[in-house]
Image: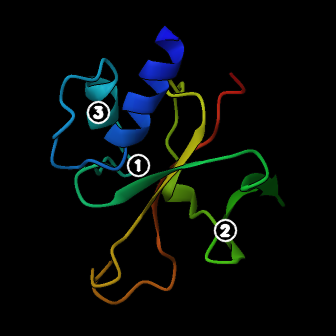
């Protein structure tokens, strides 16, 4: 029961960049997540947990199933380190965000693979 409540709170938190669910024990971990270039993941993008079968590796790259198609995760978007949440998470750019001086054709800001928990 306690694990279920923790996972439910964490699922809400990854979709809560404003910190509304600030009481979650995973909040500091979520807020610390950065891509390989050092940019924070939660501050500008919306996080979505992924079930098994919605992410995998192909040709040495992670990919996620979004909007009905497989999208390769940019290498710089991969978060290194342990996944305390357990399930894989992808953060996607809002549709109206300009990325790297132009509109990105890849909606993925950050990705952390599942831990197999």
- Vertical placement of residue 23 versus 1, above or below: below
- Vertical placement of residue 21 versus 51, above or below: above
Which residue is depicted at the point 79% across and 52% down? Answer: 53
Which residue does the numbered mark 1 point to in the structure image? 35
C-alpha separation, residue under disc 1 versus residue under disc 3? 10 Å
Residue 44 image position (x, y, % from top left): 25, 60
- Ranked by sequence position, the earlier of labels 1 and 2 is 1
Apparent side of residue 53 relative to residue 36 in the rendered image (left or right): right
| Quarter residue 96 falls in | bottom left
Question: Which element is circle 1 on?
Answer: loop
Q: Quadrant of the C terminus?
A: top right
Residue 58 image position (x, y, % from top left): 83, 59
Which residue is depicted at the point 37% across and 29% down? Answer: 9
- Name the outermost residue toward the bottom: 102
Residue 79 image position (x, y, % from top left): 49, 42
Residue 32 bears which disc, if any?
3
Colour pattern: rainbow
């Amino acid at each position: 029961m306690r694990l279920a409540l923790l996972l439910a709170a964490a699922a809400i938190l990854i979709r809560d960049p404003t910190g509304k669910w600030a009481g979650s024990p995973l909040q500091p971990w979520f807020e610390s997540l950065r891509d390989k270039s050092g940019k924070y993941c939660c501050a500008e993008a919306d996080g979505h947990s992924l079930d098994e079968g919605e992410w995998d590796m192909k040709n040495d790259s992670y990919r996620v199933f979004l909007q009905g198609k497989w999208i390769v995760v940019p290498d710089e978007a991969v978060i290194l380190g342990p996944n305390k949440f357990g399930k894989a998470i992808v953060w996607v750019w809002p549709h109206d965000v300009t990325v790297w001086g132009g509109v990105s054709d890849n909606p993925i800001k950050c990705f952390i693979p599942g831990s197999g928990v």
